[in-house]
């Protein structure tokens, strides 16, 4: 997703679209659609947005006719995967907000965001070329991501663990930049994310006590305890593991796990 895409407010269209598509289908049709989305997510992550549709159908265990009944065109399938990925990352952020400390939630969501960006393989570019950057699809997904970043950022800033002069758009641009810079050097992702987190940390004056809720920092850095706890929490939220679908594991495809 382009960090300079149009912005707006609210993420209701994203959730409503996913809910409507599920409510109007029979249970067996919903299962087929879910398997196709899972298979397409893995295929697009591995082979790019032009991954063969017959391979996706085979991975999902359905015929190519079933794929076309659910997704008449490649763009329809790409759009559905794109929406589901964005919704997954946003849902992860909301769960982290209520399950861990503010600094752990923020660090965990950055990790989730970087993991999502690492799997895109040109998907957003293909969709922008097909439907336009001002389309409802691109705009609503950007809004959902921006609003989730806002909530996590504000939560951490109010807890006194992050600097106050950073915006959600700044944050998304920075993580997007790391994802682009490490596309061919994924081993550098962890180090760059750690440097980013250190740079976003609120600087404390010498001798000044840490604010309430900032106990997760250690010597001015996000502590290993906070980050390791966040890793466990994020991995427990299965939705964030976009690149680790069951179809990928069954085929023995190596997956990329980002750790801070």
Image: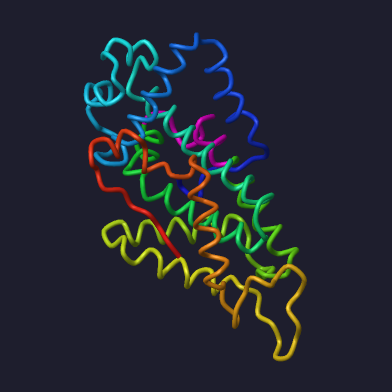
Q: Is residue 82 left or right of residue 197?
A: left
Residue at (51%, 64%) from the top-left corner? Answer: 228
Q: Position of residue 32 (x, y in %)?
A: 39, 17
Q: Based on the picture, tell me whether residue 173 belongs to the magenta stretch.
A: no
Q: How is the image coloured?
A: rainbow
- In this rendered view, identify the residue nearer to me: 235 or 180: 235
What is the span of residues highlighted in magenta in the rendered image?
130-142
Picture quadrant where residue 14 is located: top right
Label the magenta part by its dominant secondary structure.
helix
Picture quadrant where residue 167 is located: bottom right
Question: As displayed, is residue 255 above or below residue 106?
Answer: above
Q: Position of residue 92 (x, y in %)?
A: 56, 45
Residue at (31%, 23%) from the top-left corner? Answer: 60
Q: Position of residue 195 (x, y in %)?
A: 47, 73
Q: Position of residue 59 (x, y in %)?
A: 27, 26
- In this rendered view, identify the residue nearer to me: 51 or 60: 60
Q: Based on the picture, tell me whether residue 141 belongs to the magenta stretch.
A: yes
Q: Is residue 71 left or right of residue 164?
A: left
- In this rendered view, identify the residue nearer to me: 236 or 73: 236
Q: Is residue 258 left or right of residue 252?
A: right
């Amino acid at each position: 997703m382009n960090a300079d895409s149009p912005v707006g407010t609210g993420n209701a269209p994203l959730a409503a679209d996913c809910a409507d598509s599920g409510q109007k289908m029979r249970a067996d049709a919903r299962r087929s659609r879910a398997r196709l989305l899972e298979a397409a997510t893995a295929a697009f992550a591995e082979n790019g947005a032009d991954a063969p549709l017959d391979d996706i159908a085979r991975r999902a265990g359905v015929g190519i006719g079933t794929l076309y009944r659910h997704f008449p065109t490649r763009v329809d399938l790409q759009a559905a995967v794109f929406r589901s990925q964005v919704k997954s990352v946003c849902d992860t952020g909301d769960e982290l907000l209520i399950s861990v400390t503010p600094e752990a939630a923020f660090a965990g969501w950055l990790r989730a965001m970087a993991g999502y960006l690492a799997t895109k393989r040109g998907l957003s570019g293909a969709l922008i070329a097909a439907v336009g950057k001002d389309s409802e699809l691109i705009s609503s997904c950007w809004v959902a991501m921006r609003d989730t970043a806002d909530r996590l950022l504000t939560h951490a800033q109010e807890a006194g663990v992050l600097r106050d002069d950073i915006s959600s758009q700044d944050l998304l641009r920075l993580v997007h930049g790391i994802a682009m810079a490490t596309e061919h050097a994924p081993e550098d992702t962890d180090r760059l994310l750690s440097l980013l987190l250190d740079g976003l940390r609120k600087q404390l004056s010498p001798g000044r006590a840490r604010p309430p809720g900032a106990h997760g920092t250690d010597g001015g850095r996000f502590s290993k305890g906070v980050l390791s706890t966040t890793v466990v929490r994020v991995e427990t939220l299965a939705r964030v593991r976009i690149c680790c679908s069951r179809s990928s594991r069954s085929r023995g495809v190596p997956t990329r796990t980002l750790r801070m």
